[in-house]
Amino acid sequence: MGEKPKDLEERTAVFAEDVRSFIRCLPRTLSNIEDVKQLVRASGSVAANCIEGNEALGNKDRVMKFRICRKEAKESQLWLRLLHTGEAAQMRQSQDALRQEAHELKLIFSAIVKKLE
């Protein structure tokens, strides 16, 4: 997780990829297995709906897609919070960085929605 891409579609795709890399290293606990399923869906949905928002048929559609992005980014924050990382400090740092990125994406999409409405 280095410098953030300036293009929002790319940034959301990188977020989804980073989430997938992170979860490969998590301890396999029952709760992690269930929470990871939700996190994979939510993080991928941020990226997919960002693409759809940029290709929207009209302003109402665009606003709705970006609202979904905001919602899924917020949901990603929750699933990242709930995951058990084990004892490795590096895993905790990665988790915190991903939570921060989800938070920043949520703020970006909030600003976009506010501007479009």
Image (tube, rainbow, N blue to C red):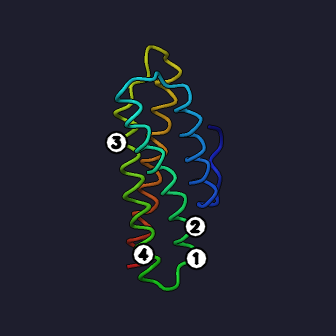
Q: Which residue is mark 3?
A: 78
Res 51 label: 2
Cβ atoms under marks 1 and 3 closer than 8 Å: no
Secondary structure at badge 1 equals loop
Q: Residue at x 46, y 21 (%)?
A: 27
Cβ atoms under marks 1 and 2 closer than 8 Å: yes
Question: Who comes first in sequence, dot 2 or dot 3?
Answer: 2
Q: Residue furthest top?
A: 87
Question: Who comes first in sequence, dot 1 or dot 3?
Answer: 1
Q: Residue at x 38, y 37 (%)?
A: 35
Q: Residue furthest bottom?
A: 58
| Depicted 27 relative to depicted 76: above or below | above
Q: CA distance from mark 4 to mark 2?
A: 13 Å
Q: Amino acid at mark 1?
A: Glu
Label 1, residues with CA under 10 Å away: few <14, some 14-19, many ≥20:
few
Q: Amino acid at mark 4?
A: Val
Mark 1 or mark 4, whichever is nearer to me: 1
In the image shown, does 37 or 109 lie closer to the viewer?
Answer: 37
| Depicted 61 relative to depicted 103: above or below | below
Q: CA distance from mark 4 to mark 3?
A: 23 Å
Secondary structure at badge 3 equals helix
Q: Which residue is mark 1?
A: 55
In the image shown, does 73 or 34 lie closer to the viewer?
Answer: 34
Q: Which residue is mark 4?
A: 63
Q: CA distance from mark 1 to mark 3?
A: 28 Å
| Depicted 27 relative to depicted 10: above or below | above
